[in-house]
Amino acid sequence: MAEIEMTIDSVRRGLLGNQHVVILKEKLTERYLLIYIDPSQADVMKRELMGIGSPRPAHFDLSLDGVDIENFEPVSVIINRFEDNNFYAKLLLKHGNESREVECLPAEALAFGIRKGLSILVEAEVLGKAGIDVDIANKVGDKNH
């Protein structure tokens, strides 16, 4: 399947309630993907984006589903599924010619990706289902707004 490279646009807290969202932006267009995360995940991601890091080690620092990551180089974060309003993610790891994909929570994968400077990819099908297109050119050119 085709994967589209994204960047983290922001991590925000909603005005009502205690909802947090990480906003991913497609690198080449004005298309976004919003993934709701819990407050503690938002805090970890904000700290990683600011370069502060987490005050305690994340479980990714030790292992991923029994895969010793010291033997594997992390390559990318992939948001690979969107089902029943839930996102799913995996980390792509390589060691020589061997590669492994490890399923994990999207917020944890993104925080790990930020920490390690990994590419963030989203499957085209996921972006097609849950992405938000912002057509700025039409909004600017529309004199009725």
Image (cartoon, grey):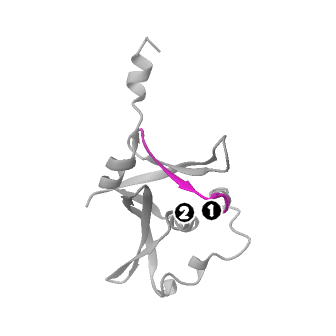
Q: Residue furthest left?
A: 1
Q: Position of residue 127 (x, y in %)?
A: 36, 50
Q: Which region shows up in magenta?
A: 30-43
Quadrant location of the N terminus in the rendered image: bottom left
Dot 1 amino acid type: Gln
* Disc 1 residue crowd, few under 14, some 14–19, many 20+, Cα 10 Å: many
Which residue is located at x 52 percent, y 65 percent? 113
Question: Can you identify the residue that label 2 sits on?
Answer: 107
Q: Position of residue 38 (x, y in %)?
A: 61, 59
Q: CA distance from mark 2 to mark 1?
A: 6 Å
Question: Can you identify the residue that label 1 sits on?
Answer: 41
Choose top left, top right, bottom left or bottom right for residue 48. bottom right
Name the one closer to the observer, 124 or 52. 124
Dot 2 amino acid type: Ala
Which residue is located at x 45 percent, y 82 percent? 72
Q: Is residue 63 left or right of residue 91?
A: right
